[in-house]
Amino acid sequence: MSNSAPLLIDETNLSYAWCRAFLHIIDHRGNEVSPLIISLTGFNQGIPNEDQSIRDALDNCLKNNSEQSIHTVANTIFPGSLWRNSKYDRQRFFKTYIDTLPRIKALAKSKNRRGLYFERLIAFGSESHNFNQLEHIISEYTSRSNVRKSMLQASIFDPAQDHVCDPYLPFPCLQHVSFVPNNEDKTLVINAFYATQQLINKAYGNYLGLCRLGHFMAHEMGLTLDRMNCFVGVEKLQKIGTKKIGKTSSILTPVIDAARNTTSKWQT
């Protein structure tokens, strides 16, 4: 059973935004929120504000249950270390990612067998028709003024690959991203849409990855990241690792305690 009323969370700290969604499900009837809208500001050179106590508690929970870390999940959307190692040269960055992709996928074969989000963003489609959506957006925006905003969007979901009848499909949950520049104040907003999202093992890393992607796009477009908006059709508290979890599961106790300790710091 789900909470059917929309939940809008507007925060200046990524950790507190995640905590508010998490505790909303813990404290209300059902194991889902539908829909959830996260709107995040508060960036320092593209890096979102975080609370280390929350991140550590969640990362420890993930590690203890053989799940990917927050950083690893974020890297599926935007591999920031590769960008830095490429000296912020985006063409070199794109090439390095594609060249490294077989090794990246091999690190978690079962999770990555259908692809990775950043792969879809810079190599969408079949091998013979790969299309770099991010390069198209950047080059079109920077080549002339008054580019239509509907051009500044990128797809993840590919009907040719993803309309399958599997009872459970872990990828892709992220469907679509769009970028909205404000040419007057030279800022950028990134919007993302998820059909569904796993709150414990994916959401925090997803929000972090989207912020990193937004910062990259803003940098390449000559702008500054101002806001990240994420719309989630169904945010689910369902399982971690192979274990189904409920709101009273002892697995979550340290995370719940850490989250409750932050409530006085939330935006109101």
Image: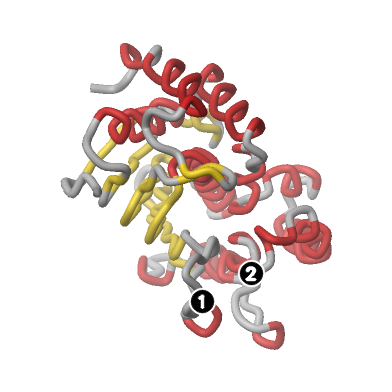
Where is mark 1, residue-wise?
A: 162
Amino acid tagged 2:
Arg
Q: Residue at x 73, y 55 (%)?
A: 108
Would residue 3 be found to the left or right of residue 188 on screen? left
Between residues 157 and 110, which one lies in front from this camera angle? 110
Q: Residue at x 51, y 68 (%)?
A: 156
Q: Position of residue 211 (x, y in %)?
A: 51, 43
Helix, strand or loop at disc 2? loop
Between residues 241 and 151, which one lies in front from this camera angle? 241
Helix, strand or loop at disc 1? helix
Counting every numbered tag in the picture gives: 2
Tell me how the rendering is colored.
secondary structure
Amino acid tagged 1:
Asp
| Residues under numbered marks 2 and 1 in contact, where contact means CB atoms less than 8 Å apart | yes
Q: Which residue ends up furthest to the left in the rendered image? A: 5
* Badge number at residue 114: 2
Would residue 83 be found to the left or right of residue 7 on screen? right
Q: Position of residue 17 (x, y in %)?
A: 37, 31
Q: Is residue 200 visible?
A: yes
Q: Residues within 10 Å of mark 2 (few under 14, many from 20)?
A: some
Q: Position of residue 135 (x, y in %)?
A: 61, 67
Would residue 206 be found to the left or right of residue 238 on screen? right
Q: Residue at x 36, y 70 (%)?
A: 150
| Mark sitting earlier along the chain (2/1) | 2
Q: Is residue 186 visible?
A: no
Q: Residues within 10 Å of mark 1 (few under 14, many from 20)?
A: some
